[in-house]
Image (cartoon, rainbow, N blue to C red):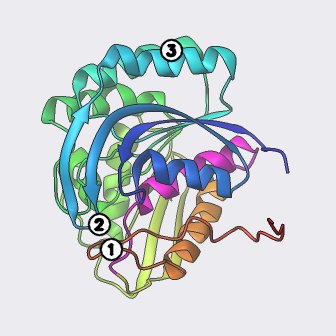
Amino acid sequence: MKPKSKILIIAGSDSSGGAGIQADIKTVTALGSYAMTAITAVTSQNTTGVKSIIPLRPIEISKQIEFTSKDIKPDAIKIGMLHSADVINAVLKSLNKIKVKKIILDPVMVAKGGTKLIDNNSIKILKTRLIKKVSLITPNIPEAEILTQTKIYSTNDMIFAAKILIQLGAKNVLIKGGHLKSQIMQDIFMNKNEISIFKNKKINTKNTHGTGCTLSSAIATNYSCGKTLKKSCEMAIKYVNHSIGTGPRYGRGHGPINHLSTLNINKKFK
């Protein structure tokens, strides 16, 4: 099988393999595409939390984006952890140079264990500049609350927050509803023309490390292959839910999901 498309991932590394660049590469590969990377930071973490974050210099992040894209042009880009204003500005400059239209932004702000991964100045630039550059932004509820300065307790609140993000310049928004206390998962997809709600049964597990990274990479992969953005979101949500439901239960904390849930390996190696 040959890769269907090429995805450039701009994100941080997760040493435990459940989130970040590692989850992104697994997702893109499992869905049949080719993954390239620009690493923004190196973290030491496991399922119980983040021990340290070592940021890469903005110039080195830009080199990764531009030098890689000059040789192998991405069909889509997924953006994850951007830890400083300088990094966001550097990424914006590089995006303007490489001119890729399909861009999915996962505004990573807080780790699963509660560690804050972005400062207030970075949030401001993300809201005023980066959000206008991308095709879709995929915040979870805590991230949507930070970006819109509102509180979210219901799907109506999610719709209200999505409308604020559209007003800020977002072309399309997917607010993930996993943090609401409900037996049914409701994810809100919105743009200026439509509102769609994806409903799925919530899987009761603590092993959801990396779901946001995985979802945004799955959307980018589907979108790069010619699916509409709405259909890309729907397919990605199904992939993530199946991966949660078949999770390997590794680690003592928030364990990873099963990125290989789409694969059926028939070849026997001797």
Q: Which residues are magenta?
A: 206-228
* Residue occupying the far front of the picture: 270
Picture quadrant of residue 103:
top right
Q: Position of residue 183 (x, y in %)?
A: 39, 88
Is label 3 in contact with label 2 (beta carbons under 8 Å)? no
Circle 3 is placed at which residue position?
96
Circle 1 is placed at which residue position?
251
- Crowdedness near tag 1: few (<14), some (14–19) or many (≥20) residues, C-alpha within 10 Å: few
Please state if 263 lies on the left or on the right of 100 as rendered: right
Residue 82 seen from this side: yes
Name the residue: 52% across, 33% down.
Answer: 37
**Element at badge 1?**
loop
User: Label 2 sits on what residue type?
Assistant: Thr
**Element at badge 3?**
helix
Depth order, front residue of 208/253: 253
User: Label 3 sits on what residue type?
Assistant: Asn
Q: Which mark is residue 120?
A: none
Please state if 143 lies on the left or on the right of 25 as rendered: left
Spatial CA distance of label 3 from label 1 is: 40 Å
Q: Position of residue 23 (x, y in %)?
A: 48, 54
Please, what is the dominant secondary structure of the magenta stretch?
helix
